[in-house]
Amino acid sequence: MLIPLSSRPQREYGDSALQSKYMEDDGGPSYWWRDKRIRELQTVFQQRDISVELQHELLNRIGIQEPEIIERFERFFQKHPNIGGAQQTLRSFAESEDSKRKWSWIGKGFATALLALLTAAAGAVITMKPFTIWHYVIWAATLLCAGFVIPTYRTPAMQYYGVKEHECQQQ
């Protein structure tokens, strides 16, 4: 609903004091789902007594990311009290994200290899008679491992703010 004003407002949308979040919006998806994460991040900034200029610079860079990335940045920011500039902070965060991405990839690869090995073992021991407790242990381990591995391939890949993404954003 639009209502005409009787006079000019004291502060217009886009005024720096208002922190207008949709200023220069490109018309893409709505940002309402990020608001909670951003407010929590701003609370952390205020608790740490970060200058308003540095807050704006960090929010301009990290605020356009997925909520999970914003949440991880908030945790990173809380754990690293010796903040330099925005560039140094975001670069350090990007390096930690790359480490998480690497370990996620290694974990997924290890779990996949373990599932393949257990499946082969389960197939091999089925021909061995008599059945012992070890047959059931291998079969149970195979099913348990499959229960963990298969869902990881059905869920979308986690998004990261690594060095590559950080450098692309700088350009």
Image (cartoon, helix red, strand yellow):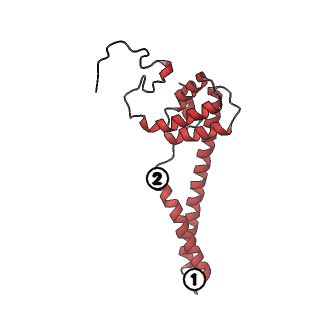
* Quarter in which the N terminus is drawn: top left
- State the image quarter where residue 52 is shown: top right
Q: Name the residue beneath numbered marker 2.
A: 155
Residue at the extreme front of the image, as rendered: 6
Single out the residue that lies furthest toward the bottom: 130
- Residue under pointer 1: 128
Q: Is residue 9 above or below residue 101?
A: above
Please give the name of the residue rendered at 42% of the width and 22% of the height, measured from the top-left corner. Answer: 24
Outermost residue, right side: 82
**Which residue is found at the position 61% from the left and 52% from the top?**
106
Q: Position of residue 144 (x, y in %)?
A: 54, 68
Which secondary structure, mark 2? loop
Decide which of 67, 116 is in the foreground and name it. 67
Whether residue 140 is visible: yes
Mark 1 or 2: the one toward you: 2
Q: At 50% across and 56% down in the image, what residue appears?
A: 152
The amino acid marked with disc number 1 is Met
99 left or right of 143 in image: right
Q: Is residue 116 above or below residue 164?
A: below
**Which of the pair 125/103 is nearer the observer?**
103
Q: What residue type is disc 2 on?
A: Thr
In terms of depth relative to the viewer, which is nearer, 85 or 125? 85
Q: Quadrant of residue 118?
A: bottom right
